[in-house]
Image: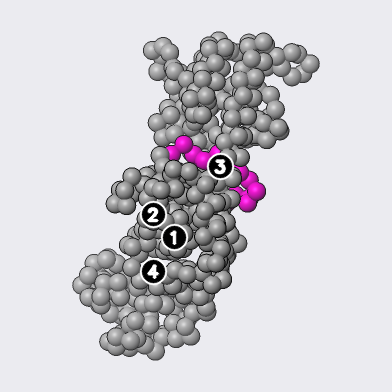
């Protein structure tokens, strides 16, 4: 099907005599026409970045969307803006099917398209534009069909991930039928949280090696009641992200030890404008944080995907809470968070609660780094960039504030776990 896109893009380029680029509605690159000539100025930074990185930035997307491209039903002209990196003007052909925009075809205008009549205002469009819009409509039909096929597999994946143990065999069999031969490969679940997209909004999957299916799941929707698996399977999400859905992506691996396809998918999905959202920390105003991704353990049996999903979601939560683990974390590398993500949400321990207020954030960070460094003062002071005496003073304040004795192992454990849990 990707070859069909390229053929249609080439048809548009030939009809209008201009290099064309096809992007999905999230500005992910699908296909592009050849650039003829030696004039490097025609390849402005925006088009070059789109081709090399296969995606435009959020700022570029916002700049183009300000011209109304998402609402346009016919071709429209975008003027150049060197300050935005758009050295050459463009003609945008919205790619629609049954009224829904699925992407955009971009035509670079080096000056020879300036007088091309696009239609509107009572004037008929140039026949070349009509021909190009027919090709764009063909692209829209292909993208819509791909979205429907992807949505069907996504629905089957969702049904399995939320299934009860008694329903798992049936749900796995249905997904196996949909995946066909891919069902016998080594598979991995990738979780991206949060994922800001309406549940009913289906889009074609990115063209990534090994990406088989994807679906969104409410963050509050862990495994179904009675689900089996690791302790994390019963874990509700943190309240800060309880209303934000997460994305589950199913990736085929070459082998259980070759995870490149899963990492590539995770990194690509994190660059989507749908990844990320606001997080309201206790006692603090909501703030925007980037999304994070997690990888579960590889599985060969489809019935093991619900457990792999819980592992992936736990790893993503850990990566979001602990930047040093992310932005992509693997379940088997998140350490104590394997246990902490399995705990139900609860109010902070009364002993530690005073330390978690915004006014004591510096003390909390000092205590956490001290415990991360196994109580070694020299390592802690170096990590924090402070003098040892400053460290001892802060630790003394922590003890006074909480009533804990940092020379006692049980008190250290309580404080360490409370601080890590607060991150979630």
**Nearer-the-camera pick, 310 or 343:** 310
Label 3 element class = helix
x then y, percent, for residue 20: 52, 21
Q: Which residues are magenta?
A: 195-208
Camera-nearest label, 2 or 3: 2
Q: Which mark is residue 300?
A: 2
Label 1 element class = helix
Relative to residue 215, is residue 423 depicted above or below? Answer: below
Per the model, the C-alpha gap separating discs 2 and 4 is 22 Å
x then y, percent, for residue 112: 55, 10
Relative to residue 90, is residue 357 depicted above or below? Answer: below
Circle 4 sits on which residue? 338
Task: Please report the residue visible at 54 percent of the width from the left and 16 percent of the height from the top.
Answer: 11
Q: Is residue 414 magenta?
A: no
Task: Please report the residue visible at 52 percent of the width from the left and 24 percent of the height from the top.
Answer: 4
Disc 2 crowd rating (10 Å Cα; few below 14, some 14-19, many 20+) is some
Q: Is residue 67 left or right of residue 256?
A: right
Q: Which mark is residue 150?
A: 3
Per the model, the C-alpha gap separating discs 1 and 3 is 21 Å
């Amino acid at each position: 099907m990707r070859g069909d896109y390229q053929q249609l893009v080439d048809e548009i380029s030939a009809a209008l005599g201009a290099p064309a680029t096809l992007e999905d509605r999230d500005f992910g690159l699908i296909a592009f026409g050849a650039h003829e000539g030696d004039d490097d100025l025609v390849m402005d930074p925006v088009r070059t970045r789109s081709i090399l990185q296969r995606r435009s930035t959020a700022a570029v997307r916002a700049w183009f969307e300000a011209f109304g491209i998402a609402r346009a039903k016919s071709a429209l002209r975008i003027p150049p803006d060197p300050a935005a990196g758009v050295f050459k003007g463009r003609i945008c052909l919205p790619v629609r099917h049954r009224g829904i925009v699925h992407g955009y075809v971009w035509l670079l205008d080096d000056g020879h398209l300036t007088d091309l009549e696009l239609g509107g205002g009572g004037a008929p469009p140039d026949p070349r534009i009509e021909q190009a819009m027919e090709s764009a409509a063909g692209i829209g039909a292909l993208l819509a069909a791909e979205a429907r096929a992807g949505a069907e597999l996504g629905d089957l994946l969702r049904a399995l991930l939320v299934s009860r143990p008694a329903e798992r065999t049936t749900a796995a069999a249905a997904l196996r039928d949909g995946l066909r031969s891919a069902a016998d490969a080594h598979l991995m679940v990738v979780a991206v949280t949060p994922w800001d997209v309406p549940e009913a909004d289906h889009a074609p999957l990115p063209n990534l090696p090994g990406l088989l299916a994807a679906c969104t799941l409410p963050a509050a929707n862990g495994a179904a009641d009675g689900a089996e698996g690791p302790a994390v399977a019963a874990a509700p999400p943190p309240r800060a992200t309880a209303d934000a859905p997460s994305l589950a992506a199913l990736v085929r691996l070459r082998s259980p030890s070759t995870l490149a396809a899963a990492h590539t998918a995770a990194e690509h999905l994190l660059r989507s404008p749908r990844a990320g959202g606001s997080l309201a920390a206790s006692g603090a105003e909501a703030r925007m944080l980037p999304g994070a991704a997690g990888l579960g353990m590889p599985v060969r049996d489809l019935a093991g995907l619900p457990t792999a999903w819980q592992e992936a979601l736990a790893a993503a939560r850990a990566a979001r809470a602990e930047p040093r683990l992310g932005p992509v974390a693997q379940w088997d590398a998140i350490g104590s968070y394997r246990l902490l993500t399995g705990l139900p949400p609860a109010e902070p321990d009364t002993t530690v609660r005073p330390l978690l207020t915004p006014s004591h954030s510096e003390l909390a960070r000092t205590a956490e780094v001290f415990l991360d460094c196994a109580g070694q003062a020299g390592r802690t002071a170096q990590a924090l960039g402070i003098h040892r005496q400053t460290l001892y003073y802060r630790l003394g304040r922590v003890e006074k504030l909480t009533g804990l004795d940092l020379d006692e192992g049980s008190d250290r454990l309580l404080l360490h776990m409370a601080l890590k849990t607060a991150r979630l």
